[in-house]
Amino acid sequence: MHDRSVEERVRDFTEVDAGCTLDEAKVESERCIQCKKPLCIKGCPVNIDIPAFIREIAAGDIRKAAVIIKEQNMLPAICGRVCPQEVQCEGQCILGRKAKPIAIGMLERFVADWERQHGMVLPQKKPATGRRVAVVGAGPAGLTASAELARMGHNVTLFESLHAAGGVLMYGIPAFRLPKEIVKAEVDAVLSLGVDLRLNHLVGRSVPIQELLNFDAVFLGTGAGLPYFMGLPGENLPGVYSANEFLTRVNLMHADRFPVFDTPVKRGSRVVVAGGGNVAMDAARVARRLGAKVTLVYRRREEDLPARIAEIARAKEEGVEFICCANPVRILGDQVMTGVECVRMEMCAMDASGRPEPAHKEGSEFVIDADIFIAAIGQGPNPLLIGEIPGLKRSKRGNVIVDNDFRTSQRKIYAGGDVATGAATVILAMGAAKSAAQAIDRMFRQE
């Protein structure tokens, strides 16, 4: 795909990727060798028949390609943009062993965008079963579970605490990576299956737990909305944000357009972001677009950065400064934040993830002048709802414990996505939600 120029894109929130043309998509699809045992399907958490939809692109039948994708995935335009294809479907492509793998994500995005422009066709639904299922959280997991259950003929009520559906797709991922009109279009497609969406409904508060338990089954897809902080001295100073709050204010609540919208965000002249994942890259690139000089501090080596390679490269192109093998230890300032004290890190023995475990290097302290600090070091499940459900077992980290069918300790309550696994990718949450929906359907048929 073609990226917009750095000079142009760093001044706005318009999508960076320009996509591909029909001719380019056909040329790329013709590279597929149509393996008899396609490993790419195994690499896809939602099991799209990848060779089949690519074959239809090569034949020029984009409509049929869209139908094939939507048999397994109702959010293809989203997945084509934000899935880490390089370690999933494309990572399994046999062509990648000696050359470039097929650009599966680019082709999925092309098909989804083409269908949206030429009229979307919904998959068929099975006859109504009369079963009522409550889905809590309208993020990737909740939307996927809702779509699957509705297609199975069940009556689905989708509860969302915020004023817009989409979850992290709306409040977390910036518009320059995932335009909000794309999210809205795919949410509308899910709702067209008959899903009853109830916005501004906070289960456990405005929706009593007992009302939830009156449904025949419940799926919890509430994600990981509780940000982690580093416990640094000075974290209570003005100008210290979690990445969750910073991105939510800008992405969903339009704080970048304050005072046109009444949600403010402090526009720092010098911003420090702590972390190395995709969320850290998103926060850093948003801060750049708000006019700041941005430094990203990561405690391991550059080659250990967990963010997607493309997002790291784009952040660098857009002027984000990277300081690796360093870690913040103190937020400086009295009433007003003035900087971030950091220390250099030495790489020691490998940890359980196979990366070197960093340790502070004595006498290596240095200061970065800053008026904004953004912690992007991960997040966990929000205990507000799951702590209210009696008998719901959770791990030490607060995640809901599920079995192989994504069933919780409560017989008719299922959970999937970040609320069960901790923060992970959009597509992994969707894969878990699909499996949970299938398990709920089996439970109904076995009763």
Image: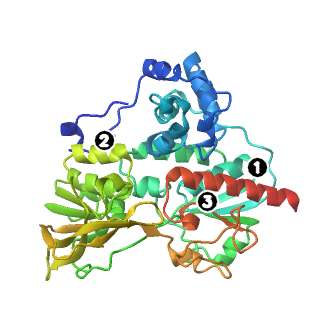
Q: Which mark is residue 282?
A: none
Vertical comparison of 175 with 381: above or below: above
Q: Amino acid at mark 3?
A: Leu
| Marked residue nearer the N-terminal end (1 or 3) | 1
Q: Position of residue 70 (x, y in %)?
A: 62, 37
Q: Amino acid at mark 2?
A: Thr
Q: Quadrant of the C terminus?
A: bottom right
Q: Which residue is mark 3?
A: 158
Vertical placement of 8 versus 167: above or below? above
Q: Are marks 1 and 2 in contact (CB under 8 Å)?
A: no
Q: Are marks 2 and 3 in contact (CB under 8 Å)?
A: no
| Residue 5 located left or right of residue 221 | left
Ranked by sequence position, the earlier of labels 1 and 2 is 2
Q: Secondary structure at mark 1?
A: loop
Q: Give the residue at mark 2.
A: 14
Residue picked out by circle 1: 153
In the orientation shown, which residue stands out farthest toward the front?
Answer: 349
Q: Position of residue 110 (x, y in %)?
A: 48, 30
315 displayed left or right of 42:
left
**Number of residues whose C-alpha sits closer than 10 Å to that of mark 1, classed few (under 14), some (14–19) or many (20 or more):** many
**Amino acid type, callout 1:** Gly
In this view, the residue in front, 216 or 299, is 299
